[in-house]
Image (cartoon, coloured by chain):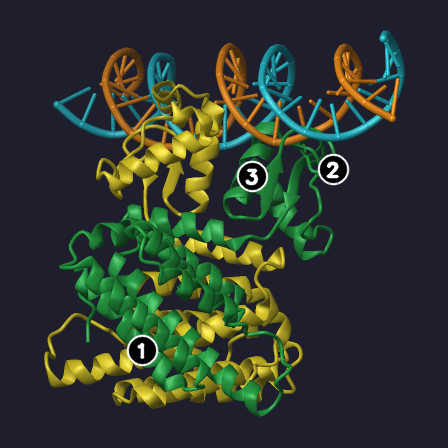
Chain colours: A yellow, B green, C orange, D cyan
Amino acid sequence: MTVEERRAWEIVLARIEDDLLGGRLKPGDRLPGERALAAELGVGRSSVREALRVLEVLGLVRTNVGSGPTAGAIIVALPGGGMSVLMRLQVAAQGFPVADIVKTRLVLETAVAAELAEAVLSDALLHPDRRGHDLGPCLQLLDAMDSQDLSEDEFLALDAAFHLSLAEACGNQVVIATMAGLRNAIEGYVLAGVARLASWPTTSTRLRAEHRGILAAIEAADPAEAHALVHAHISGYYAETRLHPVAH
Amino acid sequence: MTVEERRAWEIVLARIEDDLLGGRLKPGDRLPGERALAAELGVGRSSVREALRVLEVLGLVRTNVGSGPTAGAIIVALPGGGMSVLMRLQVAAQGFPVADIVKTRLVLETAVAAELAEAVLSDALLHPDRRGHDLGPCLQLLDAMDSQDLSEDEFLALDAAFHLSLAEACGNQVVIATMAGLRNAIEGYVLAGVARLASWPTTSTRLRAEHRGILAAIEAADPAEAHALVHAHISGYYAETRLHPVAH
DNA sequence: GTACTGGTGTGGTCTGACCACAGAGCCTAC
DNA sequence: GTAGGCTCTGTGGTCAGACCACACCAGTAC
């Protein structure tokens, strides 16, 4: 049997992936207990645990101790966590240069803004009842950021949430998870960069205004303007904090 | 100690991440043995193994049995593997809709093509000696795809390699890994989609021509054209295989 | 010099045991 | 009859120990 060639934990991982692809496992389902799974696959419980650990970090299962219907390993699909860990560690291990993280964020976020503006345009023209693209959460976050008694950390947390809310309004799960991961990976660098700013009040005021401008461009159904504003917003901030000299 | 609150394997993971961030671990370094690490951190060896398993899947370490300088867990930074597993499993668990995968690929790949074209433009004008942006591998893959005795699988493998080679020419590690993951995640769907094509020879001929056109637009330093051609190439193919109705 | 052969340390795996936890059901006190 | 507390059971979390296959390395026999 070729399946015996692999390491034991890979057998477990492959089995669960196969069950997912075959529809035998869906989000919300409970996996068999670790002991039962080990017996069923003919491997040790420690091997099962290694596979479950991988699935947990990747955001595929959530484990709960105890008893009852909520206990055990439950299939979820929360890509954000796994993506964040992956990117954060790759940055730490120097596999992902920070400059590349920023560039990628630039690409994704400008595309998101442009797509949102296009969606506003097409929704307004064709089908006003079409599914969400709800910009409400974005606006709420901007309002929250107008509060004057925010610490730098709190402001940056809201800033991250706003940028993510744009992706969420777009609805693309892959982009949402990726952007969350990108932001998480360089969070430490962002916080460190604030210290290099000439004036935090000046910068935060400018950021607030730029956010409003981006949202306005989206609501005005102007994809090109939204794209340009997001590009200027992100590259300008990183250039200012000297986190990374954004090229061209 | 708050550190004691976490689960044992998280302590190990946090320790290694901290060593990476602190520069005490770099790519190429060897980790202490599992037994030594367990003793040092005051956890069981199985907990250390769970953490190492996660790091291995995430593409951060490579483990080797035996003895000598190559044995043990060695820090690497190969984001592609981890990204592929993550995205493949998220697709399997329905956390990543295939449509979103395709849309994201569209965004990244059009941006890559446009950036390459811009790089050709700026290199030609300003600094012809600037770092690579070597399109040679891309061209070699296109030549290889011209062979008439390729199976569908072989052709698609070269196709995937070509698209990835564009990202590699761009040099953005994050984009390279993400695109590899995206492609890997929907590889099964791509293969299945071939069966729904009206005529494989017709389609493959068209794909060859489109690839040449994309590369020509890049070498002609025409970002807008490269962007448009890539968009048409990808969305057209997916529409043809009915893998996914690309919107707008 | 060469070929073999044992020693040594590595990850890979399994087994068994114990713990904390949370629900389920029973059992008592009122 | 009901409310409260109880034990019982099964879960994941963890650890310790053992064995294996493997790969290198040094010593040995030739």
Q: Amino acid at mark 1?
A: Leu
Instruction: Report which residue position mark 1 lands on.
Output: B229
- Judge left or right: residue B125 versus residue A141: right
Residue C15: image location, x then y, percent? 49, 12
Rounded to the nearest angstrom, the CA distance separating label 1 from label 3 is 44 Å
Circle 2: element type: loop
Contact, CB < 8 Å: mark 1 with mark 3? no
Using the rendered view, name the quadrant where residue A223 is placed. Answer: bottom left
Q: In which quarter of the view is residue A134 placed?
A: bottom left
Looking at the image, tell me whether mark 1 or mark 3 is earlier in sequence order: 3
How many numbered marks, from 0 up?
A: 3
Please provide percent x and percent y for residue B223: 41, 84
The dot on residue B69 is 2
Do the residues at pointers 2 and 1 share their chain? yes
- Number of the label disc, if any, that sits on residue B51: 3
Q: Are marks 2 and 3 in contact (CB under 8 Å)?
A: no
Question: Residue at (34%, 73%) from the top-left corner?
Answer: A166
Q: Residues within 10 Å of mark 2 (few under 14, many from 20)?
A: few
- Residue D10 left/right relative to C14: left
For label 1, the SS is helix
Q: Can I make out residue B1 in this image?
A: no
Residue at 50% x, 64% y is: B174
> Which residue appears farthest toward the front when viewing the image?
B148
- Image location of residue B158, percent across then percent down: 39, 57
Q: Amino acid at mark 3?
A: Ala
- Residue lying at 57% horizontally and 72% vertically, measured from the top left: A99
Q: Split into 4 quadrants, where in the image is the N terminus of chain A?
A: top left
Q: Is residue C18 above or below residue B44?
A: above
Q: Earlier in the sequence, mark 2 or mark 3?
A: 3
Amino acid type at image mark 2: Pro
Return the x and y of residue B104 as percentages of the image width and height: 34, 66
